[in-house]
Image (cartoon, helix red, strand yellow):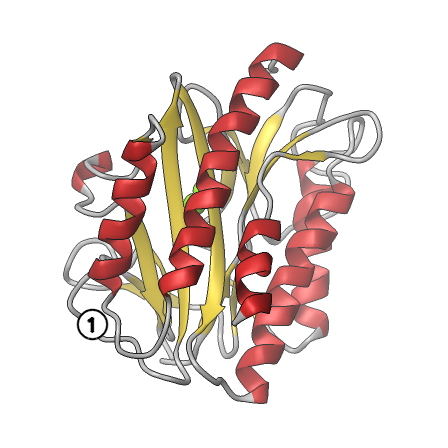
Amino acid sequence: MLNLKTDEEIGLLKESNMLVSRTLAIVAEHIRPGVTTLYLDKIAESFIRDNGGIPAFKGYGGFPGTLCTSVNDEVVHGIPSDYVLKSGDIVSVDCGVILNGWYGDSAYTFAVGSVGDELRRLLDFTRASLEEGVRAAIAGNRIGDISFAVQSKAESGGYSVVRELVGHGIGRRLHEPPEVPNFGKRGTGPKMEKGLVICIEPMINMGRKETVQMRDGWTIRTLDGKPSAHFEYAIAVNKGKADVLTTFEFIEEVLNKI
Ligand code: MG
Ligand code: MG
């Protein structure tokens, strides 16, 4: 059975996810060549706490950071560190909060300084694959319809889809059923209903799909060492268009000013 949320609960989830969106915009203001990922982490943690939230990832399974910061060939779950970002890097910043007992979770992959056209294209396709997934998230459709939409868009660009990590339901827990894979067949998986709240989060590789976990016990990298991108929204399923509980608008306001 899927855990469906009332309109009131979705309102609370939206507040949590808006705090995540605003946190990612604060991070956007500070991303530039020369800053460390740990510095971004500290800024995010202060902002979340100043706004009455709790960093959701910190301590989750022992994870040490407020953010997951995954650079270049790191796919997800990178640990904020003294790594100094340099022009030409891409960095996926994944952020989770708890606000009033409800979770928010979103990720955006940033270009640091000036990045090459090949990387820009990877970012554009990954973002577009997320948007295609959202379009398929309609009551009456199945989870596999989202999976198929994401995979089709990513592979149409010549990219590959990470298999080992998937999207998820979200609510009073960070990860709830159902799993939301970024690959799959149309018409398969659980049927979606109004009130289902899920995170769609394509992890798309420039090269091959295989990944490997680093010895730190967290960081997932591409096996072939080629770059990977990651974007994530939390959405509430509706009879028509899904209600996107996260927004990248705050990030884009910042990036457009730079
Ligand atoms: Mg996330
Ligand atoms: Mg997630």
Between residue 93 and residue 162, name the one nearer to us: 93
Q: What residue lies at 22% left-to-right and 60% top-to-bottom?
A: 39
Query: x, y percentage for residue 253?
Result: 59, 58
Query: x, y percentage for residue 120?
Result: 58, 79
Cβ at disc 1 under 8 Å from ligand 1: no
Q: What residue lies at 60% left-to-right and 15% top-to-bottom?
A: 5
Between residue 148 and residue 9, name the one nearer to us: 9
Q: What residue lies at 80% left-to-right and 35% top-to-bottom?
A: 241
- In the picture, the quarter occupied by the N terminus is top right
Ligand 1's image quarter is top left
Left or right of residue 134, residue 10 in this image: left
Left or right of residue 229, residue 117 in this image: right
Q: What residue lies at 48% left-to-right and 22% top-to-bottom?
A: 171
Under mark 1, the amino acid is: Tyr
Left or right of residue 255, residue 39 in this image: left
Up the image or down, 48 lies above or below 93; here it is above
Between residue 247 and residue 105, name the one nearer to us: 247
Left or right of residue 202, residue 80 in this image: left
Up the image or down, 188 lies above or below 116; here it is above
The part of the image, by quadrant, that contains residue 75 is bottom left
Residue 55 seen in this snapshot:
no
Between residue 117 and residue 75, name the one nearer to us: 117
* Residue with the mark numbered 1: 83
Up the image or down, 66 lies above or below 209; here it is above
Residue lying farthest to the front in this orientation: 257
Residue 142 seen in this snapshot:
yes
Instruction: Give the SS element for disc 1.
Output: loop
Query: x, y percentage for residue 186?
Result: 76, 45
The part of the image, by quadrant, that contains residue 160 is bottom right
Query: x, y percentage for residue 91?
Result: 39, 68
The part of the image, by quadrant, that contains residue 200 is top right
